[in-house]
Amino acid sequence: MQNEVLFAILALISIVSSIVMISAHRPIDSALSFIVTLISIAALFALVNATFLFVVQIIIYAGAILSLILFIIMFLNIKDENLPDEKYKNRWLLGTSIIITPFSLILIDLILRSDIAVHALRDEKFGTIKDVGATLFSQWILPFELVSILLLVALIGAVTLSKKEA
Amino acid sequence: MLKGYMILSILLFSIGIVGLISRRNIIVMYMSIELLLNAVNLSLIAISGDLADSSAQVMSLIIIAIAASEAALFMSLFVVLFRNRASLDVNLFTILGGKE
């Protein structure tokens, strides 16, 4: 019962702050409200006992990626004339939501009608760093190595892009 | 509880799609992409909690790593584009079209 109440509160916070994120005019406002979304999603992770992913979400998303975005926004020194003048922003948002709503309603209807919940029993070490690490290094070793190559490519790409042309 | 998580994930994904299509500010578009990845992560974690299987958690860990590398690329892209165009409007970014 307590979990359902917490879930409802966190779901409301994440939806409201993500709507604020896509509709704010200045990027700093949307970045700050996106932090709220990410932290509430991290709390939702903790609600299903995914403790390690909760920590990772806080450290990497809310800590590293969002502080990088905030750093870039402040570093670029964006003024109002640098922003696109989205005269019809609200109309665009309304029109796109009208187009997207039927698809999400179909998906929600499918979820509500299907019988997906299994309610398997979770033991104590579920979601801990030991459990996740054992799965990662036994069954998922190839994707893990591929991710290291991807990170290397992204590193080289970022350095090459930001190099000043001679 | 699982159905609630799935519905919340669908709603967040739809909000991200709406933001990605209707905004022209490239930083907001980038954060909408991150919101899409987070919605997928949320449903993966919910399924993993329901099945008591930690494979889905590893999957979402890999998705977080991909999002981090994407963040690094996007940040250097913002700096280069803002240096060339002095704007964040995606309609002005036509460098790939070949005509200056």
Image: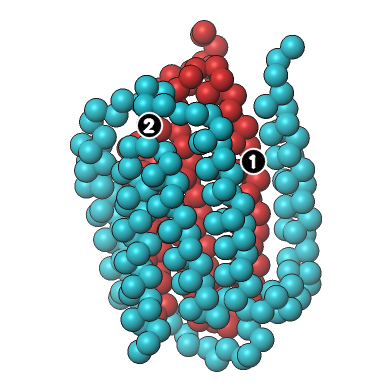
Chain colours: A cyan, B red
Q: In the rendered structure, which amino acid carries the disc numbered 2? A: Arg
Answer with left or right where residue A93 lies relative to residue A69.
left
Determine the chain carrying the residue at label 2: B
Q: Spot the residue most to the top.
A: B100
Q: In the rendered structure, which amino acid carries the disc numbered 1? A: Ala
How packed mark 1 is, by other alpha carbons closer than 10 Å (few <14, some 14-19, many 20 or more), is some
In the rendered image, residue B62, in percent from the top left (x then y), is placed at 65, 59
In the rendered image, residue A95, in percent from the top left (x then y), is placed at 22, 41
The structure residue drawn at horizontal position 72% and vertical position 27%, both measured from the top left corner, is A160
- Above or below, comparing residue A63 to residue B57 in the picture: above
Quadrant where the N terminus of chain B sits is bottom left
Q: Secondary structure beneath disc 1?
A: helix
> Gap between marks 1 and 2, in whole Å?
21 Å
| For the residues bearing labels 1 and 2, Cβ distance under 8 angstroms | no
In the rendered image, residue A135, in percent from the top left (x then y), is placed at 72, 74
Q: Secondary structure beneath disc 2?
A: loop
Mark 1 sits on what residue? B72
Circle number at residue B24: 2
- Above or below, comparing residue B7 to residue B1 in the picture: above
The structure residue drawn at horizontal position 61% and vertical position 68%, both measured from the top left corner, is A55
N-terminal of the two: label 1 or label 2? 2
In the rendered image, residue B77, in percent from the top left (x then y), is placed at 59, 30
